[in-house]
Image (tube, rainbow, N blue to C red):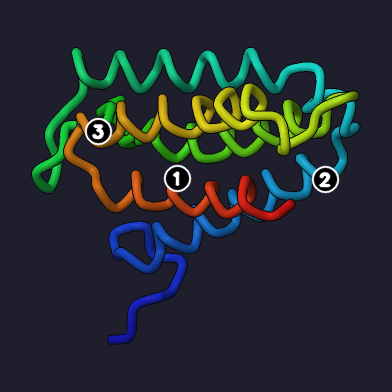
Amino acid sequence: ETASIFNMDTRHGVQLVWIGGAIVVGFVIMLVDGKFFQTFSYPIYIVAVLLLVYVLVAGRVIAGSKSWFDLGFFRFQPSEVAKFATCLALASFLGSYNISLKNLRTRLIAMAFIVVPMMLILLQGDAGSALVFSSLFIVLESR
């Protein structure tokens, strides 16, 4: 008997649901006005950093890293939100009026946006996710 791809008892069935959910979220994000993201970029970043701090205290160890919240019906990794939030806050900061990456102060602030979540993720033992943040330094080198 062949299993249906929509069978929720199989790994591919669950993955199909997550893929569908991601597509829906992607469309919703595309429909939201860009001003919303510009307005709320810093609060979203702050919430993401707070989640990274909280997971160090109340997180669950999975695959050797304490970087997950177990909500019972699914697991949540705050570093995934932090990736999005950091990119959003960095873009908002660098897109501000009168910002130049030639200014040392500007570069240091931009680096802080990247380093803070990166270090919190390294403290969780998740070097792979922290490595993703290092790619954001490329943005700072392109003048």
Disc 3 residue type? Ser
Residue 77: x and y, percent?
35, 35
Q: Which residue is mark 1?
A: 133
Is 70 on the left or on the right of 134, as rendered? left
Q: CA distance from mark 1 to mark 3?
A: 16 Å
Q: Which residue is mark 3?
A: 67
Circle 3 SS class: strand
Q: Residues within 10 Å of mark 2 (few under 14, many from 20)?
A: few
Q: Residue at x 75, y 33 (%)?
A: 94
Q: Residue at x 17, y 39 (%)?
A: 125
Q: Residues within 10 Å of mark 1 (few under 14, many from 20)?
A: many
Q: CA distance from mark 1 to mark 2?
A: 23 Å
Q: Residue at x 71, y 49 (%)?
A: 26
Residue 30 circle label: 2
Establish if 45 lies above or below 19: above
Q: Residue at x 53, y 47 (%)?
A: 137
Residue 54 quadrant: top left
In the rendered picture of this protein, how many numbered marks are placed on residues?
Answer: 3
In front here: 98 or 134? 98
In front here: 4 or 72? 72
